[in-house]
Image (spheres, helix red, strand yellow):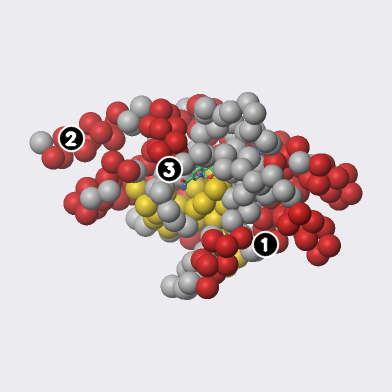
Amino acid sequence: MSTKIPMIKFSNGVEFQLFGLGTWESFHSTDALTFKPALEAALDAGYRHFDTAQVYGNEHIIGEFLDEKITSGQIKRSDIFITTKLAPLFYHPGAAEQAIQKSLENLKTEYIDLFLIHMPFGFEVECHILLPQNELFVFAKKLGITFTSYATLGSPGRPNKDPNDPNPTEVPLVLELSKKYKKTPSQILLRQMIQRGIAVIPKSTNPDRLQQNINIFDFELCEEDMAKFNEIKTKKWLFKSFWEMLKVTLNIRLMDIKIWQWYKRRID
Ligand SMILES: NC(=O)c1ccc[n+]([C@@H]2O[C@H](COP(=O)([O-])OP(=O)(O)OC[C@H]3O[C@@H](n4cnc5c(N)ncnc54)[C@H](OP(=O)(O)O)[C@@H]3O)[C@@H](O)[C@H]2O)c1
């Protein structure tokens, strides 16, 4: 697959694709039977950058999948970029090292390309057309910090979603541009973020939507249309706060019993 995905270079020289696969949220992402075919569809569609985290509970599935592909010679480890994140439970120097070891084991890899401290501030931020994060983006840029948007599509499948929350895919400007460029609203949202120079990691486990989401490198929003996004008046955090995020994450993994048991075995 020859999808030409733009790259950026971190200050340490490591290259990073501006487009990747988000894997948080769904039941599907923690169930190998349904998640592996989604990973297969993503790989076939040209995805090479995978975003996971210890709390997503799916590192081992991604690890198994990529290991099978690497062992069978279909891809090389160096073709793949893996991001994972330290679970809040391990925000302690001693615990962090063990947690990294566990991620390496789960992912069946000798190195992790990008290891983040999960939440509350970092390289990944909630960023979409209803929360463009302009000031933060400019500030990060000045410091040479790369910026990745999550919830670019408005995270419609997030647990505890408030039904009154606005949906970025339904914003009139997005619908208008969708018609004009003959692209879906989701493609418009992803393309707009890429053109701002911000990385995106849309999550999907649906083969058609996986394909649709990566199919954004064959068109360009003109400058005039890009400027129209600055006129959107509605501003909205969809993930309410750090505590809300924490609650959601903890709900999903129910304290990730497996990680907790593993940690306890080590400190006992
Ligand atoms: N660092 C952090 O604290 C943090 C926090 C949140 C998220 N993240 C990362 O960012 C990734 C993306 O964020 P997100 O998953 O919250 O939100 P998102 O990517 O904005 O939205 C994902 C949702 O949109 C649906 N979807 C995907 N493509 C679509 C399309 N073309 N048309 C219509 N619906 C579509 C997906 O359902 P289907 O699967 O059914 O397609 C899923 O329910 C996460 O998966 C995770 O890897 C990081």
- The residue that mark 1 highlights is 196
Split into quadrants, the picture shows ligand 1 in the one at top right
Mark 1: few/some/many CA within 10 Å (<14, 14-19, 20+): few
- Three-letter amino acid code at disc 1? Arg
Look at the numbered disc 1 and give the secondary structure of its residue: loop
Task: Relative to 14, say whether 127 is above or below.
Answer: above
Look at 76% across and 41% down and name the residue there: 171
Percent x, y of residue 212: 72, 43
Q: Are marks 1 and 3 in contact (CB under 8 Å)?
A: no
Q: Residue at coordinates 37% horizontally, 42% vertically from top-left?
A: 54
169 up-or-down from 224: above or below: above
Q: What residue would you read off at disc 2?
A: 264
- Image coords of residue 134 (percent x, y): 61, 60
Mark 3 or mark 1, which is nearer the start of the sequence? 1
Q: Is residue 195 above or below residue 209?
A: below
- The quarter of the picture where the C terminus appears is top left
* Residue 258 falls left or right of residue 58: left
Mark linked to residue 242: 3
